[in-house]
Image (tube, grey):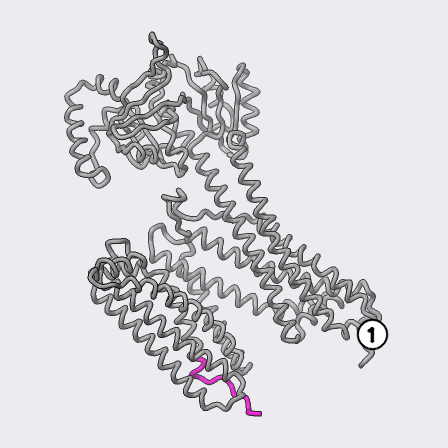
């Protein structure tokens, strides 16, 4: 039998270089749009990209060839020879596919056709095949690119697996020295990034985002390495607790057969992945609930005082009494009715709300949500046309029209302008549907009109768009419109009446109790007082039910991981049958044996749960602070909302440990039934 040889220096370099190459391909693919946009009109940057990437590929190819040449001299049967050959061949194939895929992208970027289409990979390929070379048949090029990139991803995964496998060919002494140097360098890097780099990126700053990503990445790797370093000392400390804990810890630390070792590792990973999935999904759903709650509370009051089917007369004392209640920070009246809004191009239904511009900001975030116009235009509509016009938003033609309307309006007395054209604030989606900008004229049709010979006649009145708001909720932006309260009362023939009073409280969670207090102190017949939870109970109830359903559904994954723990402990009982027989021969009771294996299962569940919760925390933290971008045109949010709840982490961790603990009961019972005479018969 040939003598086993350790992993050579050049093979170790190939392992590290190949893993870095696979990582670089992923990073380049994820940031390709930024690179392509930066190369617009910059031929030097494009040349640097091509030369740098080509040099890396050539170096990796030469290194792979050198390793294959050295490995070919090893005699057959040498330990690790097949793995090194497979790594060299896979790396060479990966270099070829990467050269093809990146070469196609650099070629497409060089033609500069795809830049006008957004700079994405799809637009680059489209521009290359249909615009830059319209006279050539290049329809096969996108198919080639997709095929090569798919094979490239598979080869990258195989390279990582083979590199990890080749790592175990390094002598243990060298591996230990490497890890000590690596840990020292990692500790220094952790101190530097913690001191110098921010953990939360600045909004819209790519360099700040990169620094934050580097800090979180280094901190995560440092935490993983520190945890692995503490496993041995923690088990040694656990052994000192008692006899049963010592035996359980020794069982886990003892060298096992290959299949059992793999099964133990997979069971811990199964518990970690399932708990990570569960906590990540719950955090995302909690983020959606928190985002929805924030938008609802920003656009509606915490408490609404109104009547079910009629309006409120003599409402000033009610408003003053409400404002004087302890815990109330703001109150404003409103008048609400459904109307039809019509522009020159379209019409749509809307919920018209008459508001008091002086006090509405005390209760809602309407002023902060305005993207165009101002809230004060409701009280002073004559200032709408007097304001400057932003041609970048309205366009040159719209600006000319607005100039003409403003010039015509300036010839009218201010009283006539105010009476004939009051201001109207609409949502972004309603403005988009009706194709409106600030200063446009619309007609509002109200069902509260005069009674004619043929029946009721709807009342119409022209308004001028005084502002456009964006609330973040499609229903509000599409259906809500605001006018001045006095104008609304005259237009809707309310004669000084209002629909109700909106109230904002100091503590949001105290709204139900404060609503009950207001209901008892008002003392008006037919008046109802509703808090925000009562008005949206169906929506939040549906979210809570969905969250519970997801918890149960993904909890099944933890249950499946519990079966993996069950199988691992069953195999461990069979392998440690002789040791169990010795323990029972020495006087250990059946209950003591059960406790030993239950402790082992508890340690496996705790290790997997902590690993999963840690990974879940890193993922949710990164998603919360760095943001997973989403298409606002489709989802109406620009990034995935995430909310970290410590209670959910505790519940998921407890559920994971309990499932793993339950999975240990039957194997532990089997171990307790082992008879010493049967276990030691052939010894």
Residue that sits furthest to the top in the current view: 453
State the extent of the magenta-drawn residues as a range. 1-12
Q: Is residue 11 magenta?
A: yes
Q: Position of residue 77 (x, y in %)?
A: 54, 88
Q: Is residue 459 left or right of residue 569?
A: left
Q: Number of labelled discs?
A: 1
Q: Which residue is mark 1?
A: 678
Residue 488 in the image, given as x and y percentages of width and height: 35, 19
Instruction: Name the foreground residue: 303 vs 89.
Output: 89
Front-lying residue, 672 or 123:
123
* Nearest the eye: 104 or 675: 104
Q: Quadrant of the C terminus?
A: bottom right
**What residue appears at the point 45 percent right and 51 percent down from the top-left corner?**
624
Residue 94 x, y percent position in the rendering: 39, 73
Q: Is residue 411 left or right of residue 498?
A: left
Q: Residue at x 29, y 72 (%)?
A: 52
Q: Quadrant of the N terminus?
A: bottom right
- Label 1 sits on a secondary structure element that is helix
The answer to whether residue 451 is above or below residue 499 is above
Secondary structure predominantly adopted by residues drawn in magenta: loop
């Amino acid at each position: 039998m040939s003598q086993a040889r350790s992993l050579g220096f050049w093979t170790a370099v190939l392992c590290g270089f190949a893993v870095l190459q696979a990582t670089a391909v992923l990073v380049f693919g994820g940031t390709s749009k930024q690179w392509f946009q930066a190369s617009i009109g910059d031929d030097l940057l494009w040349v640097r990209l091509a030369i740098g990437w080509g040099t890396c590929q050539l170096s990796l190819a030469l290194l792979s060839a050198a390793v294959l040449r050295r490995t070919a001299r090893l005699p057959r049967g040498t330990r690790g020879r097949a793995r090194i050959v497979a790594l060299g061949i896979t790396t060479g194939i990966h270099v070829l596919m990467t050269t093809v895929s990146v070469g196609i992208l650099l070629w497409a970027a060089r033609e500069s056709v795809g830049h006008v289409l957004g700079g994405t990979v799809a637009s680059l390929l489209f521009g290359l095949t249909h615009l830059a070379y319209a006279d050539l048949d290049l329809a096969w090029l996108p198919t080639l690119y997709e095929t090569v990139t798919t094979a490239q991803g598979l080869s990258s995964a195989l390279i990582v697996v083979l590199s990890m496998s080749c790592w175990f060919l390094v002598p243990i002494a060298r591996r230990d020295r490497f890890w000590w140097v690596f840990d020292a360098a990692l500790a220094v890097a952790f101190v530097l990034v913690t001191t110098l780099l921010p953990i939360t990126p600045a909004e819209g700053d790519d360099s700040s985002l990169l620094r934050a990503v580097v800090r979180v990445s280094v901190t995560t790797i440092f935490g993983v390495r520190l945890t692995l370093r503490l496993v041995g000392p923690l088990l040694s400390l656990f052994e000192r607790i008692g006899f049963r804990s010592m035996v359980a810890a020794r069982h886990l630390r003892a060298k096992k057969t290959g299949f059992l070792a793999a099964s133990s590792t997979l069971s811990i990973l199964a518990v970690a992945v399932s708990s990570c999935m569960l906590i990540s999904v719950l955090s995302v759903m909690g983020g959606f609930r928190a985002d929805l709650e924030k938008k609802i509370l920003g656009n509606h009051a915490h408490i609404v005082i109104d009547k079910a089917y009629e309006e409120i007369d003599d409402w000033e004392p009610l408003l003053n009494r409400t404002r004087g209640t302890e815990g109330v920070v703001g109150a404003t009246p409103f008048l609400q009715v459904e109307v039809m809004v019509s522009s020159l191009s379209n019409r749509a239904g809307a919920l018209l709300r008459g508001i008091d511009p002086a006090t509405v900001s005390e209760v809602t975030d309407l002023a902060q949500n305005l993207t165009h116009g101002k809230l004060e235009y409701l009280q002073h509509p004559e200032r709408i046309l007097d304001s400057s016009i932003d041609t970048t938003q309205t366009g040159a033609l719209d600006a000319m029209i607005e100039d003409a309307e403003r010039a015509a309006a300036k010839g009218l007395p201010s009283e006539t302008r105010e009476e004939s054209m009051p201001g109207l604030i609409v949502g972004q989606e309603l403005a988009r549907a009706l194709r409106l900008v600030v200063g446009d004229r619309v007609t509002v049709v109200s069902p509260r009109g005069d009674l004619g010979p043929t029946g009721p006649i709807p009342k119409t009145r022209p308004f001028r768009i005084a502002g456009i708001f964006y609330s973040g909720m499609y229903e509000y932006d599409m259906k809500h419109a605001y006018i001045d309260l006095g104008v609304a009362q005259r237009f809707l023939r309310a004669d000084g009446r209002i629909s109700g009073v909106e109230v904002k409280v100091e503590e949001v969670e105290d709204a139900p109790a404060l609503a009950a207090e207001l209901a008892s102190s008002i003392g008006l017949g037919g008046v109802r007082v509703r808090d925000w939870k009562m008005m949206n109970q169906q929506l939040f109830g549906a979210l809570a039910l969905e969250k519970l359903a997801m918890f149960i559904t993904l909890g099944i994954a933890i249950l499946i991981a519990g079966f993996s723990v069950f199988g691992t402990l069953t195999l461990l009982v069979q392998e440690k049958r002789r040791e169990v027989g010795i323990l029972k021969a020495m006087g250990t009771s059946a209950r003591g044996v059960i406790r030993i294996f239950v402790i082992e299962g508890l340690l496996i569940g705790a290790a997997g749960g902590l690993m999963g919760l840690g990974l879940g925390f890193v993922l949710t933290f990164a998603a919360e602070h760095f943001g997973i971008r989403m298409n606002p045109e489709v989802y109406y949010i620009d990034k995935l909302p995430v909310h970290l709840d410590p209670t959910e982490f505790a519940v998921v961790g407890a559920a994971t440990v309990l499932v793993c603990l339950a999975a240990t009961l039957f194997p532990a019972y089997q171990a307790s039934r082992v008879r010493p005479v049967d276990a030691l018969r052939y010894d």
